[in-house]
Image (cartoon, helix red, strand yellow):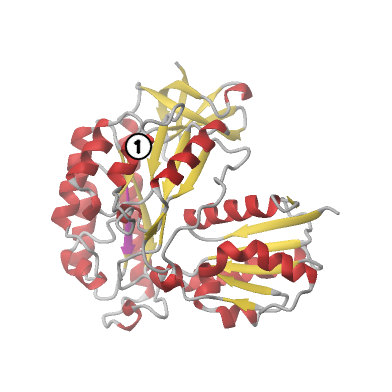
């Protein structure tokens, strides 16, 4: 008897990887995944809790799932399920709540739910007790050029604005042998690019016995046959040791693109945020990366209107963004998150000021992106052709994380080709096959 399952995923890239892994585990038990609003027998909503707005989106996704599949069993998992299980369980139509600590048990819990076996409606263990990253089937996404590989989970830091450590637990790593084996499987499945993901990726290996490092892992992955690019998700500047800098600036397998979160260009604000670095440290890391790899893509996150941020602090952030070779900027207006230290800090910035500061930062980000892409005009870049098509054109992703649109046949999808950048617009970059 065929059983169908649908997924709704909110939040970060790691949540998307978790969903892909759950999809693989459920499909191995005979479920068939449906998409596009088709009703299903089972719906899994993987939630986010990073902001109050995220929880609003969670509620909307749950209501939408109930409308589309009114007769389905509805399972809610993820970060909101971990931090607020009672609130989630109280929502109409929710049959089962599974926290992050028990996410690996979700297939067994679903089977029990469908059989009608008496089981707890809410299964939320202590995520602080988690000591390992559960080895799951590699999350190969059919129809996608790139694959994402979860190698680390949890976080050892306690940034004032962040609820994630309470939702994900402490830092823990997947064994290097398992990482390399999964990378080989993903390449064999047709993914020449593998993106390493984690909540606190730079802390990889510190919990393992024997202890390892991200630098050692990358050195091993460089030997995976057929792997063109290993791309790294977000990395704090404090993690760029000499060993890591050496491997990421010399290995041709490491994509020339690094996302180094900033949050503020003011040391005073960084201290209030409890960030584990200074502006000087940030500047040093970014300048070393840019000096070692010409045309390297460098992304950053910034928060607008953190409690206590002054006009002078904003000016310092803008000056730093304009001075550094940043290729794109993610801007987040600050909003108080219950359960975090920042929610109780004084010096709250009013909403209009936060919006105004966010707009100025986004303007600086757009200017930085345009300037970086203008520097690629006339260059020939190797791109991985994505499965996305925009009208008559294909979309290729460069090693330095720029999407280039160019004419070409569908047979090039998921292949590596060389493209010359010909035109740069505010939001688009165009090219032609070289």
Near-viewer residue (380 or 148): 148
Quadrant of res 44: bottom right
Q: Is residue 327 visible?
A: no
Residue drawn at (58%, 52%) of the image: 21
Near-viewer residue (235 or 308): 235
Q: Residue furthest top?
A: 434
Does residue 285 appear left or right of residue 402 in this picture?
Answer: left
In the rendered view, tell whether residue 62 sits above or below residue 122. Answer: above
Does residue 370 appear left or right of residue 93 in this picture?
Answer: left
Q: How many marks?
A: 1
Residue drawn at (62%, 32%) of the image: 391
What residue range appears in magenta?
299-303
Callout 1: helix, strand or loop? helix
Does residue 338 appear left or right of residue 111 in this picture?
Answer: left
Residue picked out by circle 1: 220
Q: Main secondary structure of the magenta part?
A: strand
Q: Is residue 412 magenta?
A: no
The quarter of the rendered structure image containing the C terminus is top left
């Amino acid at each position: 008897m065929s059983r169908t399952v649908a997924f709704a995923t909110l939040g970060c890239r790691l949540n998307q990887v978790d969903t892909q892994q759950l999809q693989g585990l459920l499909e191995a038990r005979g479920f068939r995944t449906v998409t596009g609003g088709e009703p299903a027998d089972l719906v899994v909503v993987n939630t986010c809790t990073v902001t109050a707005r995220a929880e609003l989106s969670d509620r909307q996704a749950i209501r939408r799932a109930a409308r589309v599949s009114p007769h389905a069993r509805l399972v809610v998992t993820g970060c909101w399920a971990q931090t607020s299980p009672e609130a989630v369980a109280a929502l109409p139509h929710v049959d089962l709540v599974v926290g992050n600590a028990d996410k690996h048990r979700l297939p067994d819990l679903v089977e029990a739910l469908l059989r009608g076996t008496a089981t707890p409606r809410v299964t939320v263990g202590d995520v602080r007790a988690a000591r390992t990253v559960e080895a799951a089937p590699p999350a190969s996404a059919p129809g996608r050029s790139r694959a994402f590989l979860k190698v680390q989970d949890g976080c050892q830091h306690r940034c004032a604005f962040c609820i994630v450590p309470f939702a994900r637990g402490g830092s823990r790593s997947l064994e290097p042998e398992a990482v390399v084996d999964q990378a080989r499987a993903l390449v064999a499945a047709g993914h020449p690019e593998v993106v390493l993901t984690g909540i606190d990726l730079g802390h990889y290996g510190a919990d393992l016995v024997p202890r390892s490092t991200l630098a050692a892992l990358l050195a091993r992955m460089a030997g995976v046959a057929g792997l063109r690019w290993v791309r790294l998700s977000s990395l704090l500047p404090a993690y760029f040791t000499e060993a890591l800098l050496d491997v990421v600036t010399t290995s041709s397998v490491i994509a020339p693109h690094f996302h180094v979160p900033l949050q503020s260009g003011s040391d005073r604000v960084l201290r209030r945020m409890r960030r584990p670095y200074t502006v000087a440290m940030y500047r040093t890391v970014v300048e070393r990366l840019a000096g070692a790899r010409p045309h390297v893509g460098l992304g950053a996150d910034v928060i607008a209107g953190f409690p206590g941020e002054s006009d002078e602090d904003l000016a310092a952030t803008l000056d730093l963004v304009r001075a550094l070779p940043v290729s794109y900027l993610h801007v987040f207006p600050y909003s108080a998150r219950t359960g975090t230290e920042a929610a109780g800090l004084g010096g709250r910035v009013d909403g209009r000021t936060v919006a105004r500061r966010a707009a100025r930062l986004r303007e600086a980000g757009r200017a930085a992106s345009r300037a970086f892409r203008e520097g690629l005009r006339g260059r020939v870049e190797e791109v991985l052709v994505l499965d996305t098509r925009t009208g008559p054109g294909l979309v290729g992703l460069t090693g330095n994380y720029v999407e280039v649109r160019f004419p070409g046949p569908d047979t090039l999808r998921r292949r590596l080709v060389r493209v010359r950048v010909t035109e740069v617009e505010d939001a688009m970059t165009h090219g032609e096959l070289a």
